[in-house]
Amino acid sequence: MTQADDFGFGTQIRKSPYFEATVRWGAKAFSVYNHMYIPRDFGDPEQNFWNLVNEAILCDVAVERQVEITGPDAAKFVQMLTPRDLSKMAVGQCKYILITNADGGILNDPILLRLAENHFWISLADSDILLWAQGVAVHSGMDVRIGEPDVSPLQLQGPNSGLIMQELFGESIMDLKYYWLREVDLDGIPLIVSRTGWSSELGYELYLRDGSQGDALWERIMAAGQAHGLKPGHTSSIRRIEGGMLSYHADADIGTNPYELGFDRLVNLDMEADFIGKAALRRISEDGPKRKQVGLVIECAPLKGPNTTFWTINQGGNEIGKVTSAVYSPRLEKNIALAMVVADAAVLGATVEVVTQSGPVTATVVERPFYDPKKQIAAA
């Protein structure tokens, strides 16, 4: 059996509280995300996909670090970071938000959790928002405290995740609504549980509030899930692309604005509150975005894995954009991709050329998401 100490980039890359458990349970390769190891391989990624959509998987996503914001001005400060109107966000609620800079560029697309009136967690995608928030706070004149708490999430995702949660917490957990959270205790292990996840499936995130109990929590969940087909796993590129979910640094970055992604609903220019990037986003809204994200179906042999470079897209002899995320979906039996193209080329049904690592192939512009467009599965 491979030992945990076989993995190592040095002490500057942090290990999660679940690291030893994931190796014990078959993790074969890791990537780095928010300066931490994240398991990316438990064997066959296609089997991982089927485990997710048919039963359930448990994923170590402790890399989703939390930026904790507290203090008398916490709510006002959090609103300054995002163009989404938070004025009606209740205690116990979660929201998908964008964090933008002065140019309207996206710095992160996290989940925001409101634990109390002036207590928030920003559950991060891959970027250093702790430093951004602390920098913004310095000259804000607001009374806030910003830090990274001892909090490490797991994702329990898939159609059987609700059954497993009942095994762990009893039937009352089924009252937890989509994008809401609850404070719970599991045999002395302190947790926040939310009905969220990065899978487009029914799922939960369990935020461990004591890193010393990571191993115990992992084993407790796997034991409870044994009767329900639970497998150790990793976040599925196949399922998240089917669901049109973004991967930060791939499908969006500091040079991408919300309107290019069709995220108009996450930008509330009419609210009274000010936020970073408001003037820039107003200009972009009035002028219209120069690029737009589209879905593609790529006509070639099944891709052997996700793209590892941005593939050029051509039309009529001109370069019009790039493929940001591509993968073969065994369920749809198609190569599907998210792409960013010039706005004039974002025409459903249009034919384009994609230059893959194997050469140029034909692709068709289609609607996204590719599967369950109304998110009925996750919200059920």
Image (spheres, helix red, strand yellow):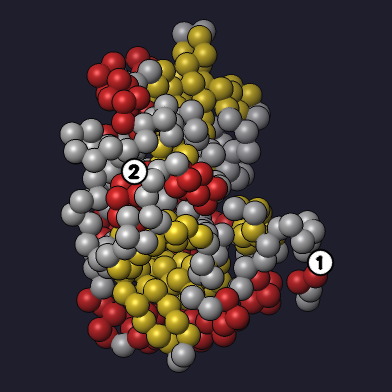
Specify whether 274 is left or right of 229.
Answer: left
Please state which of the two labelled residues, at mark 2 or mark 1, is closer to the viewer: 2
Q: How many labels does the image show?
A: 2
The amino acid beneath tag 2 is Met
Mark seen at residue 80: 2
For residue 174, side relative to residue 338 (left or right)? left
Q: Position of residue 245 (x, y in %)?
A: 41, 46
Residue extending farthest to the top is 317
**In the image, farthest residue toward the bottom:** 187
Report the residue at 28% width, 43% height from top: 84
Dot 2 or dot 1, earlier in sequence: 1
- Quadrant in which the N terminus appears: bottom right
Determine which quarter of the picture holds residue 270: top left
Disc 2/disc 1 C-alpha distance (Å): 44 Å
Can residue 278 be seen here? The reply is yes
Please, what is the three-letter code of the amino acid marked with disc 1? Answer: Asp
Residue 299 position in % (x across, y down): 49, 30
Q: Nearer the viewer, residue 27 or 46?
A: 27
Q: Can residue 199 be seen in this view?
A: no
Q: Is mark 2 on a helix, strand or loop?
A: helix
- The residue under the point 51% across, 8% down is 317
Quarter occupied by the C terminus: bottom left
What SS does tag 1 mark?
helix
State the mark number for residue 6.
1
Q: Quadrant of residue 215?
A: bottom right
Q: Residues within 10 Å of mark 2 (few under 14, many from 20)?
A: many
Residues 42 and 262: in front is 262
Toward the viewer: 168 or 96? 96
x, y percent for residue 94: 31, 60
Location of residue 25 in the rendering, given as x and y in whole percent from the top left corner: 64, 75
